[in-house]
Amino acid sequence: MTTSIDGNGAAREGILGRVKAALGRREGDAQARAQAYVAAHAHGPRPTLPADLVQGFVAQARHMESTVERIASLAEVPAAVARYLDALELPARIAEQKSHAGVCWPEFAGLDWQGAGLVVEARPTQGADRLGITGALCAIAETGTLVVVSSPCTPTATTLLPDTHVAVLSARDIVAGMEEAFARVRALPDGMPRAVNLISGPSRTGDIEQTIVLGAHGPYRVHILLLP
């Protein structure tokens, strides 16, 4: 006999519902208790951070081998991306393709990419794109880390598959530490995302002879465009 997945799911929910009723628990109680526990849980010892979180983040991001450029407005993003790509010492075969290899999140679709001499498409990466342009939910000053969450409008593969990842970040979204970052994640209006990605500089590994190699599991480069 073949039973559909939907049928199995309904049966499972029915069983769990009867167990909860027998225990006197209502739907959502467990989530509420978990949220209350997290809210009441005291933070452990934390390092002293600079009073200027933006300055602290920039220093840590550069320490993790990201590059950072401060720009004045969102409209400057295409020109800043083009300027960054022009400054890279790319192999000729890659440099020739750079204007036809970009993808971005939908929120950046309306920017003047063509005016900057770039062809950037607002779509999820298909694996062969060399440039991915994204935003970030927030960033962590303590570690120079970008926090990216998954959703239909924020495909995280764009941060992972292209050789070069450019992240557009607002200074007001820089928080002190991991605790504040995950508080923002928990406060998302649609609830917890399916995935939370913490990006601290380019992908790297030291598995082979303890030699650091960039780009082993993701981008070779992470460039951050920092807005006011």
Image (cartoon, helix red, strand yellow):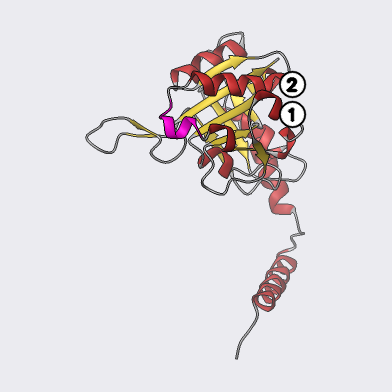
Q: Position of residue 85 (x, y in %)?
A: 53, 24
Q: Is residue 94 rendered magenta in the image?
A: yes
Q: Quadrant of residue 100?
A: top right
Count neighbours of disc 1 (C-alpha within 10 A) and say few if under 14, some if 14 to 19, many if 20 or more.
some
Q: Amino acid at mark 1?
A: Leu
Identify the residue shown where x is 30% and y is 34%: 206
Q: Amino acid at mark 2?
A: Ala
Q: Quadrant of residue 107?
A: top right
Q: Residue 131: which disc? A: none
Q: Residue furthest top?
A: 51
- Residue 57 appears in the rendering: no
Identify the residue shown where x is 67% and y is 22%: 77
Please, what secondary structure does the residue beneath circle 2 have?
Answer: helix
Magenta region, residue range: 90-96
Q: Which residue is mark 2?
A: 75
Q: Check if mark 2's residue and mark 1's residue have beta carbons within 8 Å.
A: yes
Image quadrant holding the N terminus, namely bottom right
Q: Is residue 142 rendered magenta in the image?
A: no
Earlier in the chain: of badge 2 and badge 1, it is: 2
Horizontal placement of 213 versus 220: left or right?
left
Q: Residue furthest left?
A: 209
Identify the residue shown where x is 52% and y is 35%: 97
In depth, the one of 135 and 188 nearer the eye is 135
- Residue 182 appears in the rendering: yes
Identify the residue shown where x is 65% and y is 80%: 4
Label 2 vs label 1: CA separation? 7 Å
Q: Residue furthest bottom?
A: 1
Label count reads 2
Q: Residue 111: which disc? A: 1
In depth, the one of 141 and 146 nearer the eye is 146
Image quadrant holding the C terminus, namely top right
